[in-house]
Amino acid sequence: MTFHLPKKTRILWQLRIVLAFACVCAAVAFFSRYTLWFLLPAAIIATMGLIFAFIYVPFYFNSYKITVDDNSISITKGVIIKTTNIMPYPRLVFAQSFTTPLSAMMKMKCVMLKAARGWILIPEIENVNAEYLLDNLRIKSND
């Protein structure tokens, strides 16, 4: 089975990034009461955050391709540099899923697969796909 990340993942991460950059901008702009020169770095940080959130993030999350087959899980991602991570089932030590309050409201889970020398993090995917992935891993570990 091959699937891509849902659009809700992109929206979730855009919201997170905009909130994080807004906090940084507010902190820098706070010092503008001492000198107005602090407004320039705040404007630059805000511009960088918006460019990152609304240009790079959509390309990055659209590049994700997750493939689950009989022997392994492979994840392909990247905008400029494409990388492929392959996790064979025999090397898998444990799988973990977790949610944040914001992703729980959107009915999404993040899945982390750990092997002996590395790990793969699958960003928030819909609960149905996360359960399918974890159930598939349970079946493979019992073989």
Image (cartoon, helix red, strand yellow):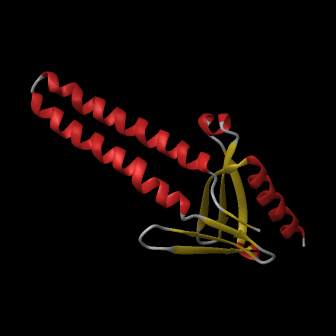
Number of marks drawn: 0
| Among the 4 quarters of the image, the one containing residue 116 | bottom right
| Residue drawn 60% across the image and 59% down it | 121
Q: Where in the figure is residue 7, as x and y percent of width and height?
A: 60, 50
Q: Say which residue appears at 62% left-offset and 40% top-offset.
A: 103
Q: Quadrant of the C terminus?
A: bottom right
**Image spot of residue 4 (x, y percent):** 65, 61
On the image, the x and y values in percent for residue 72 come to 73, 75
Quadrant in the picture for residue 76: bottom right
Identify the residue at image location x=78%, y=50%: 128
Query: Can you say whether 31 is above or below 65 in the image?
Result: above
Work out whether residue 95 or residue 125 is closer to the camera in this orientation and state it: 125
**Residue 137 relative to residue 99: left or right:** right
Pick the quarter of the image with the N terminus.
bottom right
Seen at 34% across and 45% down, the residue is 49
Residue 72 lies, with reference to residue 49, above or below; the image says below
Quick check: 7 above or below 75? above
Side (left or right) of 36 relative to 134: left
Quick one: which residue is furthest to the top in this view? 33
Report which quarter residue 12 is drawn in: top right
| Residue 3, position as x, y percentages in the image | 69, 63
Relative to residue 100, is residue 91 drawn left or right? right
Q: Nearer the viewer, residue 48 or 96?
A: 48
